[in-house]
Amino acid sequence: MANRISRITSYVEKRKLGFGVARLIMMSGVNVRGFGPNDPDPPEALRRLEQTLPQLLTTQELQELAHLLSEAGP
């Protein structure tokens, strides 16, 4: 199962394309492209990434992402 960073990156790329992922990297300071789907989520990187999402995604997109992440499990 893919880690949370990988799932978040995939969602942002699907919704906001590569530019959205580039913004996510710039805004969070986390090189999300450096994490494979089976890599563990570093807690600090995940925290910074999650703090950045409200600046990048709409409320509806955030809700959709939260639903997708909860379906996939931890």
Image: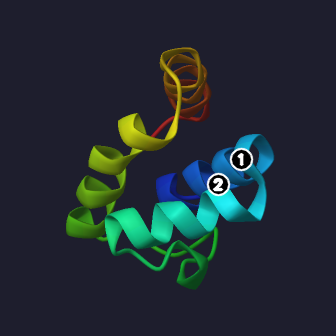
Q: Is residue 36 left or right of residue 49?
A: right
Q: How far apart are the alpha carbons under marks 1 and 2?
A: 23 Å
Q: Position of residue 1 (x, y in %)?
A: 64, 54
Residue for badge 1: 16
The structure residue drawn at horizontal position 62% and vertical position 63%, both measured from the top left corner, is 21
Q: Nearer the viewer, mark 1 or mark 2?
A: 1
> x and y percent of residue 66 in the render?
49, 26
Q: Residue 72's spot in the image, x, y percent?
A: 60, 35
Q: Residue at x 34, y 49 (%)?
A: 52
Residue furthest out toward the left: 44
The answer to which of 35 and 39 lies nearer the viewer is 35
The numbered dot on residue 7 is none
> Looking at the image, how many numbered discs can be counted on the residues?
2
The three-letter code of the residue at mark 2 reads Met
Q: Residue at x 57, y 30 (%)?
A: 65
For marks 1 and 2, the one nearer the N-term is: 2
As helix, strand or loop, the secondary structure at mark 2 comes to: loop
Q: In terms of image quadrants, where is residue 68?
A: top right
Q: Which residue is mark 2?
A: 1
